[in-house]
Amino acid sequence: MTAHVDTFARDRLPPPELLPEMLFDGPGLQFPAQLNCATALLDRRIAAGDGERLCIQGEGIRWTYNDLQQQANRIAHVLVQDLGLVPGNRVLLRGANSPMMAACWFGVVKAGGIAVGTMPLLRARELVPIIEKAQVTHALCDSRLMDEMNLAAPQCPTLRHTLSFVGGTLEAAMAGKSDQFTDVPTAADDTVLIAFTSGTTGVPKGTMHFHRDVMAACACWPPHVLRPVADDVFIGSPPLAFTFGLGGLLLFPMSVGASTVLIEKATPDVLLQAIAQYRATVCFTAPTSYRAMAAHVGEHDLKSLRKCVSAGEALPAATRGLWQEATGIRIIDGIGSTEMLHIFISADEEHARPGATGVPVPGYVAAVLDDDGQPVPPGTVGKLAVKGPTGCKYLADQRQTTYVRHGWNYTGDAYLVDADGHYVYQARTDDMIISGGYNIAGPEVEGALLLHPAVAECGVIGEPDAERGQIVKAFVVLRPGHAADAAMVKTLQDFVKQTVAPYKYPRAIEFRAQLPRTETGKLQRFKLKTETPT
């Protein structure tokens, strides 16, 4: 029975006929009716005698499991006692990866709230639709990121309370709070997090995940493919606001009593240094990062490293080869999605095959289907469809009908299955640009460019790139009186960086006299990929 007093999330779940078929056949996938994943991942670990084990490290911070629990408990008290949070309220989390961000996540979950993670680079114009769609009531924000939060807040009437951390109002409020807290006994199918992902329109989609989804993700890919142990030290680059980062850098290590290193800006050079400094054993990052790090491996002591995981975009065979040559380690590849929470097709080091993603993770089944929903023969490209113990549950969004059909989750990826049953990635089936591990919606970048007074029209596509997989490329028609030169390219790039998250800016800009459109005026992006310049 739900413990949520605020039933916002449950009231906005897709109707039963639009929910995916759920599978709970594997080990560890039978869940009690009442389940709080903070209790399962943190409190039970302490009850089992692991309280003094190292849990989280950051810049100048070493927390045991006891330390994390005490911090999270104080945050839960602040939310409930000072801010009036009731179970089911949505709490926006805004900050770079850090031990405090992890404590905030657990504090929200312990109090029965719903965590809404956001990328630290997002601007106010990107925060507002997320806050509005999730009807966020509370926010915990890194004090260094409060400027955009303050710009967004007046436009968001549901947002009642915002506290800052990193020397902010949250720590001051925590100071007088008890380090003991009784976790809210949420239902296994109460929503615990809403993860936002942009569709090809740039309109954010909120993906809802239950407490049992979190524990299911911990029971599938990690024990069967990654196989971590309690002495592992996890490290990586994906933000905790990404489900890839939340799982790989927080949930999965804690599920086995291991520790994690959370660093704020894990660029390739910083990540290499941190692996050596913290003696990390398991690394999560994107293919572009592995490619950049491979050239500098010899400058660092990476002897501690034993497992490397890639996800977020397709792993090129050349990158896999470069990394193995530099380190002797075979990268574990995988495909997951925000809608499915984490990785559902993968292969361990022994069975990894260049160019192939892998096979369905135990607990999941997959198929490559044609336009009629029928399986295609081996070697034939079709649409990837998946079922398992997690699945797509969009927050009040018509796009549920596209993602879930006949019980299958259609991921939007084109795949083929080879003769040995390995799934081989071909391309995205929509206009999403995947660059350096980030999902970027072309129309959103177009919207930013069109705000500049010099831009008359524009179209944005993903252009293949050896280093980043794809780059954002913009085709721009300028208004009369503006020069189509290198200075204008830089002006527009800088403008986009100031308007939306900087990683979305167009790395290439081509000026055109006109853009290809249909008779009704619709931009024909597919022609931009094949046209010669006019």
Image (spheres, helix red, strand yellow):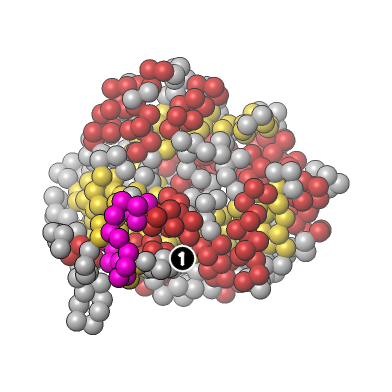
Q: Where is residue 319? Give x, y as percent.
A: 28, 33
Helix, strand or loop under label 1 = strand
Above or below: residue 376 compared with residue 224: below
Q: Is residue 421 above or below residue 55?
A: below
Q: Nearer the viewer, residue 437 or 152?
A: 152
- Asked which quadrant contains residue 223, the reply is top left
Q: Magenta segment, which residues?
A: 475-490
Answer whether residue 397 is magenta in the image: no
Give percent across and percent down for residue 493: 39, 54
**Taking 222 as reference, is 188 above or below it?**
below
* Quadrant holding the N terminus: bottom right
Q: Quadrant of the C terminus?
A: bottom left
The answer to whether residue 446 is above or below residue 27 is: below
The answer to whether 186 appears left or right of 413 in the picture is right
As drawn, the residue found furthest toward the right would be 176
Examine the rendering and report whether any part of residue 289 can be seen: yes
The residue to which callout 1 is attached is 204
* Residue 260 horizontal side relative to residue 437, left or right: right
Residue 33 in view, yes or no: no
Disc 1 marks a residue whose amino acid type is Pro
Closer to us: 275 or 304: 275
Figure label count: 1
Q: Residue at x 56, y 67 (%)?
A: 128
Residue at 66% in and 70% down = 154
Left or right: residue 281 versus residue 143 is left
